[in-house]
Amino acid sequence: MGGGYSGAGDGSNRTYGGYLGLHELLSLQREDEGVSNDEMHFIVTHQTFELWFKQVIRELREIRDILATEHVPESQVPKAVEHLGRVTEIFRLLANQWKVMETLTPQGFLAFRDGLGTASGFESYQMREMEILLGLEPVGRVSEMDPLGHFRKLATRSEADAVALVRLEAALEETTLVSALTTWLSRTPIMGSLYGSEGDSEAVQAYVDAHLTAYASIGEKASARMESQGVDNIDAVKARFAAASQGATDFLKPDGQVNRARAGLLFIESYRELPLLAWPRVLVDAVVELEESMVLFRTHHARMVERIIGRRVGTGGSSGVDYLDATTKYRIFGDLWGVRTILVKSGLRPTLINGEMYGFTGATENQ
Ligand code: HEM
């Protein structure tokens, strides 16, 4: 590293090692305990993950704070997108870092595994803090394991774990990223109608109903076509399309009432070409990309684990690979994924009203 360092102070007496705290950092790999090369590799790999987790937590709070503002300034949306992009890249890097872990052979791991006792990545409190800040609900977790409950037990036995628990419980009180995003989406101007303005409920309801009619017509046409072509099990096919149509209604109108955040999301995804929706669309894409990178990170972890320990019970007592595979089903931003199922091609979209409000001057595209 050359040149001067930025940050507090004039830095004139700084050294590389001093600035980075290298002496402390490089004394934390248990070499004084005589660990083997394999075990040091295991420790270094974990520590580097945890360092990145630390950065991710900072980024997530920053993104959440931007989106949780009541009127998010236009200039701040690109900033949120930049931070989301960084988190995504960190998870992509980490998803590849499992490859380094895989250079540990099953026998090489068995040589020191007993020494880990019940220690497991399951006890990574930074992983839990990330999940909490993103908005993973306890009900959404794999039921066999309860990470928070586990920390409550650990906290009675060690001071460091008690501190970790306090941290996690404080995080539980914070606004989650998914909730900040949902509130932000619910304020999307839909067909030119502003959130909370007079007649907004009616305008949004009319838009949602028109979209649902278009969506249902796709299923009806497709099943009629299949019937005329003599497709097998036509009754089952028809039932599937009817269920899809009902699913779209349930998504947009849970309990019979329009969900404005989902309607806003549908509007952003449907009219992606509108200039005013450009940044909202980029933001939504960035969140989907982030969640996808986390899912792949979990998937690659499971494959690495399968390669090293097969189907053994984990050191944390879970079913091991089966448990890890089940966590790849987590979708914190479920609406962002769900809306994709109910989109219609541009020619079938309800005709755009008040297009000029979105900086759009042409007619809606019919493809
Ligand atoms: C030889 C290498 C590894 C093996 C065999 C392994 C195995 C496992 C297993 C079996 C679990 C499930 C919980 C349990 O019963 O223990 C788990 C969870 C976990 N591991 Fe690993 N792991 C390894 C390396 C790593 C590394 C390098 C990290 C980086 C921090 C890590 C992070 C995690 C996390 C965060 C969980 C919790 C997942 C969740 O509950 O969603 N693991 N690991």
Image: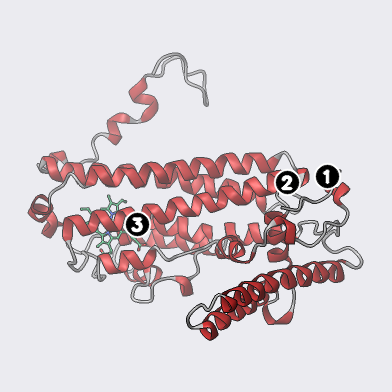
Residue corresponding to mark 3: 299
Disc on the earlier residue, 1 or 3: 3
Where is residue 223? Give x, y as percent.
60, 76
The disc at residue 360 is: 1
Horizontal side, residue 196 vs residue 219: left or right: right
Mark 1 and mark 3 residues within 8 Å of each other at the beta carbon: no
At 77% from the left and 45% from the top, the residue drawn is: 276
CA distance separating discs 1 and 3: 42 Å
**Helix, strand or loop at disc 3?**
helix
**Helix, strand or loop at disc 2?**
loop
Quarter of the rendering occupied by the N terminus:
top left
* Residue situated furthest front in the rendering: 229
Q: Is residue 278 above or below residue 159?
A: above
Instruction: Name the quadrant containing residue 149.
Output: bottom left
Q: Quadrant of ligand 1?
A: bottom left
Residue corresponding to mark 2: 273
CA distance separating discs 2 and 1: 9 Å
CA distance separating discs 2 and 3: 34 Å
Q: Is residue 340 above or below residue 15?
A: below
